[in-house]
Each structure stands twice: as C-alpha cells, then as structure tokens.
Image (cartoon, rainbow, N blue to C red):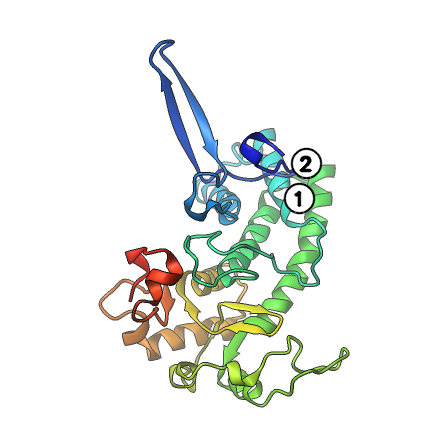
Amino acid sequence: MGEKGRPIHLGAGVMPASFKVLHDPVKNYETIIADFGECAIGRVAPIDLGFWWIILLCAHTKSTGDTSLAELPECQRGIRLILTLCLSEAFDTFPTLLCADGCCMIDRRMGVYEYPIEIQALFFMALRCALYLLKNDDEGKECADRISKRLHALSYHMRSFFWLDIKQLNDIYRYKTEEYSHTAVNKFNVMPDSLPDWVFDFMPTRGGYFIGNVSPARMDFRWFCLSNCIAILSSLATPEQASAIMDLIESRWEELVGEMPLKICYPAMESHEWRIVTGCDPKNTG
C-alpha cells in the first residue's frame, strides 16, 4: 500500500483525478500533489481519466498531424501502463471492465457500478485510439496484439448484450429464467419482471440504444447520453445501431432534450430519491 493507504499498481498506470498546489511560505517553494481519489467525493478512484488522456492525445495527433508528442517515450509508456492495468487478468468472465459506483463523469452514487456503459464505451474508444498511437516496436506490437483481441470480444459483447430495441425488448419480456449451459438464451438470468414500466412507452418502433448496465440478474435500462454518443463516434455501434440511436433521439426529443442541450440520463430520479441516492447533489435532480 502506498501513502495514505493508496494501493500501488506495479507495472500499471492510474491517472490522477486532479492536482493541488501546496505553497510553503517559509521556503517559498511549491509542490504539486496528485489526487488519485483520496480527496474525491466518496473516495472513488476515477477510471475514465486514463481513457480520456489517450483519446485526447489521439485527437491532438490526428488534428495537427504532429506525431512527435505521441511518440515521446513518456507518452508511449503512459499508454502501455494504462492499458496494462485495464487488460490484466481478473476474476471476471466478461470483456467489459468491472467498476465501482461514481468512478466516471457521473460521480455520485446512481447505480452505475459493475459494468456501466460510459466506462465500456470510453474503454472501447481508448483501445482504438491506442492502436493508432502505439509505435511499431516490440513493446508496442505486444500491447497492440492484446488490444486487438480485447476489441473483438468487447465489441461483440456490447453489440449483443447491451443493445436494446423493440425486438430485444420483446425477447427479454419472454425470457425463461434459471437456464444452464452454452445454449441458454437468457445468458445473464435476467428476470422479465424487472423490466421497468417506462421502457415500453419510451422505446419507439424505429430506434434503439445501449442500456446503462448488464450484469448477472441485473439490467439497467436507463438511457445515458454521453456513452451512446461515444458509441457512435468510436464505431462501437454498427451503422444500423448508430442510425437507431439517432432515430430514438428524434422520436423522444422532448424527453431527452427538451429545453436543455442534452440530458445526461433518462429517466431522472423522482421525489426525494435523489437526496438519498446521490448524496444531496442538486445537479442530479430532475
């Protein structure tokens, strides 16, 4: 364990959530201290920051045409360290990343733990960006091979199990439970009774979206704006799925946009639930 009980990941990289400058008036000296989640609300380490760093580095490289920054040994090592942590073996059978609640932009407890769509979409985009940025040396090739295998598994998993349209909604409604073996249709043992009433009215005949979460016996059917947009940008969504997402936004404009630029999450929490669940953060209210 590191300073203040923070775990140290040997051979892996974690991006800090923020930095604080401490000024020593006696020595007239300033020290930069990185925060890896010890000072965050709920003390949750941010998972998405490493992905955003890779994505922004790729955006800078492609927009300027200048590869000198990305090819610096420090940047190449940073990419490999972040991905070493994400691609490491764990007690998990899914290609998605297992996360704690509040580990991304939605930084309060809103039930986005386990396999939230935002982290998975950013993970997919960061993997694709890393393939573009990694140098063609021995270390880069080894990392690129692992990325390619994960991308294949992740894209299949997300497109198959996180995608929801009217056909899939009807299939889930007719699911049998407690199925066993590779031939099981209801692979996550989702209870049909867990389908929320609002989703039947929300789902148009033409349209679809990536739902918030899929884990054993649990599906979060909420719409999350950022992750579905990233799914289109990164080609996690197939061309047909991308068109369906845009059809959904057009069909449910009042619910998803209204008088705002775009709503982060739908449906919003009701009554006093937001106070209990999110920790009294008014930005998460309806």
CA neighbours of label 1 inside 10 A, class few (<14), some (14 to 19), many (20+): some
CA neighbours of label 2 inside 10 A, class few (<14), some (14 to 19), many (20+): few
Rendered position, 66 above or below 256: above
Res 124 → quadrant:
bottom right
Query: How far from the left and from the top, in percent, is residue 250?
Result: 34, 76
**Secondary structure type for disc 1:** helix
- Residue at the image point whose x is 58% and y is 82% from the top: 191
Task: Give the camera-side residue of 60 and 202.
Answer: 202
Residue wearing tag 2: 11
- Residue at the image point whose x is 72% and y is 51% from the top: 89
Residue wearing tag 1: 84
The type of residue carrying mark 1 is: Thr
- Residue at the image point whose x is 37% and y is 70% from the top: 266
Horizontal placement of 254 versus 220: left or right?
Answer: left
Query: How far from the left and from the top, in percent, is residue 278?
Result: 38, 58
Res 245 → quadrant:
bottom left
- Residue at the image point whose x is 43% and y is 87% from the top: 205
